[in-house]
Amino acid sequence: MAFTAHKDDKMMEELNETPEDVEAKARQLADMLRASKHAVFFTGAGISTSAGIPDFRGPQGVWTLAAKGEQPSASQRQVRLEAAVPTKTHMALVELMRLGLVKHLISQNVDGMHRKSGIPVTKLSELHGNCNLEVCDGCKREFLRDFHTRSAQHHLDHETGSMCPACGGKLRDNIVNFGENLPVGALHGGFANSAAADLHVVLGSSLTVRPACNMPQDTAEKGGKLVIVNLQRTPLDDAASLRVHAPCDVFMCKVMEHLGIAIPEFELQRRAVLWREGDNSVRLAGVDANDTQVPASLFPRVVATVGEKSTTLTAEPHCFSCPTDAECSVTVSFFGHYVEPDATLVLAAGQQVAGYL
C-alpha cells in the first residue's frame, strides 16, 4: 500500500492560513450553504485525526510511513477505532443534515464515525466500507458489530468466519481494498448526488483516489461550486471556488458560528429489543440506533432472569425460556469501548415487546 503515499514534497507540505483568512472563508461557506439547494459533503481521513485516528498521506500518515518502511509509533496510535468519539466536524455535519442544509454525505473513511455520530444511513455513501459491518454474500443483509469485523489476512479475502442467521450465507467484511470495486449502492448514491449538487464541500481529503475523487470533480464540471478544506494541496485545487488550508474542526466550528447553529455534543446511543417468541421463549437483540432493521452485536454477556433463576448468555442469538404469564429481565454488559455501565431491560408478564434506548 506504500505506493499510495505522496511522491513529492510539495504535495506533502501542510499549509495553515491566518486566523483572519479562516474567519473570512468560513463566512463565505456559511453564505454558500444558506444559498444552496443541494449541498453535498465529501469527507476523508482528515476529519478524524482530532479523534485520535491517523490520516494516510499527512507527514506522519499511514501510507507516508509505510513508504519509508516505518510503522506509526505508540504515541501516534492514539485510540482504537471502536473507542473513537466523533469530532466537532462529524457532529456539525449531523446538525447541518438534520436542518436540511446538507442533502447527502459521501465518505472515503472506513472508521464508521459518520454512522456512529447519527448520520442517516439513507443519506450516507460509505465508498470504501465500514469496519464495523458484516454483509451476507447471499441475502445481502447487513449486520452492525461493536467490534472490528475484518479478520482475513489476504487483502482480497473478506470472509469473517460467521454465517448469516437469516439465510445461512457466509458473512464478509465490506472494506474495499485497492483494486476492488466500490459497492454499487454507495457508488450510485455518491455520483447521483454529486451530479445534483450545486455545492460540494470536501473536508480532509487529498482527492487522489479514484473513482471517489471524480465525484466532487463532477459537481465542479457541471457548474456547481467546489469547496476544498484540506491542509495539503490537492489535484482539484484549481477547480475550487473556495480553497481553505486549515484543520477541519477549526474551520467547521467557525462556519457553524457564522450560521448561528450550535454543534451538538455526541451522545452514544444503544438500542435493543426484548420480545416473546411463541409461548415460552424470549429473545434479546441489539439493533442499529440509526436503522432498526439492521441487527447490531452490542452485548458480549447477557444475564437473563426469570423469577429466582438467572442464566448467563454469551453468544447470539440471546434466547431463553420464560412463560408468557411470567415477568423476566435481562442485564446486558457492553464491550467496554466507552466504559458503559450495565443496563437492565424488563419484560412484564403478558407484555410482548420491550425496548431500551
Image: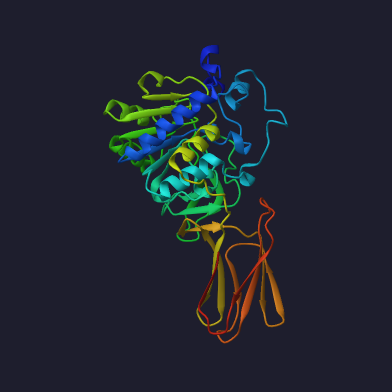
Q: Position of residue 201 (x, y in %)?
A: 41, 33
Residue 130 seen in the current view? no
* Residue found at the very far bottom of the displayed protein: 325
Q: Is residue 314 above or below residue 255?
A: below
Q: Quadrant of the N terminus?
A: top right
What colouring does the structure picture have? rainbow
Q: How many marks on residues? A: 0
Q: Which residue is drawn at the image coordinates 67% and 26% (left, top)?
A: 71
Q: Position of residue 122 (x, y in %)?
A: 39, 50
Q: Which residue is drawn at the image coordinates 61% and 42% (left, top)?
A: 81
In front of the other: 110 or 103: 103
In front of the other: 79 or 254: 254
Lateral position of residue 188 relative to residue 280, left or right = left
Residue 65 seen in the current view? yes
Lateral position of residue 94 relative to residue 223, left or right = right
In front of the other: 332 or 343: 343
Lateral position of residue 175 relative to residue 84, left or right = left
Q: Which residue is drawn at the image coordinates 68% and 36% (left, top)?
A: 78
Q: Position of residue 120 (x, y in %)?
A: 43, 51
Q: Is residue 121 above or below residue 356?
A: above
Q: Quadrant of the C terminus?
A: bottom right
Q: Position of residue 59 (x, y in %)?
A: 60, 21
Q: Is residue 290 above or below residue 325?
A: above
